Amino acid sequence: DGTSKAPPHAFSYTRPSDFVDTKLLAPQNEAGDVDPEMIPPTFWADICSSFSSSDGKIVDMSRNPDRNTGYDGRHIWEALYEENCVQMDMMREDMCYEEKVLYRLISGLHTSVTIGIAKNYYPPSKRKNRKDWESNPQYFMDRFANNPQHIRNLHFSYVVLLRALAKAGPALARYPIHTGDTLDDQSASTLFKRLLDSKILNSCSDVFSAFDENVMFDDEKRRGGNTLQTNFKGVFHNITEVLDCVQCQQCKLHSKLTIMGYGAALKILFMPDHLIEGSLERNEVVALVNAVAKISEHVKNIRELTNLFWQQRPELGIEPAKPQPAASPPMETAPPPPPRLMEEYVDLMDVAVGMIASLGQEGLLSEEQEVALVRMALDKDPGILVLAKHYHDDAKKFHAYSSSLLAATR
């Protein structure tokens, strides 16, 4: 069906999808068949072409942080998930890998937006004595406590962006930065090169295996065709057009900037290395860096909102850490978290692994200790989970007790 039907009670969106004639999309061999080996190497260069920059304006994103605007965008999300010709029904057993990737990227964007709302939910109010924007951890829990797959999709999106950043590192390091202010240019160049530092990106290499762009469209290439690649790019263009229907201008700004960052990442990952440097436009580089920063911040916000939720719910038996006497009993004898909490709320493993990673980055743990503690956390060791529960806001004590716990297990 070449016509996109709008979801009921949403907005009018009846523009028919462009008809795809594969004979016009790639060179053919002598038999008249599309030869996947002859697909132009620049095929993905226009994946962000639906973002018009002719009437663009320069916006200071630091003055426009993502936060709760009160806008009800449910009809937009319905369109993003269902409006496209590539069906994204996660219940289908025949859903191909490429569809799953696109679905997870959209879900990651959705999760990011939701976390941004939860993090800055309540506006300043003199009547309520709020000087700054405040979080709503209950809003966060209501949406993710029983849907951990959405959090995983946010992490998946982050991996896609980091893989692109790593692949394009050499090209981006040479990218000219000219704003008209010499000092700003020097500062931006220094920060950009710091972001692209191979040592920093290599520290993330263990999670890069969550996605591999090299297997994308692999089956189709072996069969000899490019319809799936064309449809994938077409769906991505369709997504950007749906976002044009967002009536909240600040919401549209953040969503389109992030989606353009996704597009820049996919362009980098799908194109040959030697074409990356000449194909990236300024707006795409800006969008990629902003997307990496936003998703990174929201990954960190997951732990912050989770901890804040626990602190605000003393009736659940979870309270902020209290000073412990010097002669306190070994922590490994403490009872594990109630099963009800393990089922209903974000797993304590995330908190534990996050704290262990921070201690490792600060040089307080050896590589052997870090690996052992992470393994204990992933194995849901009761002692580590109890420490994460009670000392999530006291890294010094978490370090001391976890080291003692590790020594006791050897």
Image (cartoon, rainbow, N blue to C red):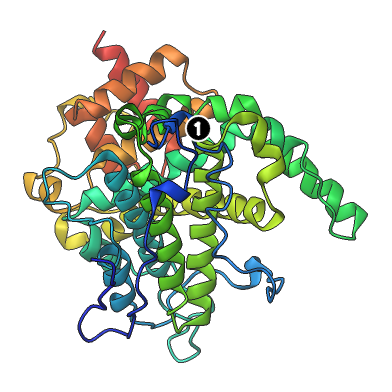
**Residue at the image point whose x is 9% and y is 45% from the top:** 338
Q: Residue furthest top?
A: 410
Left or right of 346, for residue 136:
right
Which residue matches tag 1? 38
Q: Looking at the figure, which quarter contains the C terminus? A: top left
Left or right of 138, for residue 355:
right
**Residue at the image point whose x is 33% and y is 66% from the top:** 80
Residue 324 visible in image: no
Percent of width and height locating residue 134:
44, 72
| Quarter holding residue 236 | bottom left
Q: Is residue 346 above or below residue 399?
A: below
Q: Residue furthest bottom?
A: 127
Q: Residue furthest left?
A: 339
Q: Is residue 129 above or below residue 331?
A: below
Left or right of 400, for residue 258:
right
Q: Looking at the figure, which quarter contains the N terminus? A: bottom left
Percent of width and height locating residue 279:
67, 45
Q: Is residue 103 above or below residue 197?
A: below
> In the structure shown, which secondary structural element does the residue marked by tag 1 occupy?
helix
Circle count: 1
**Residue at the image point whose x is 61% and y is 24% from the top:** 199
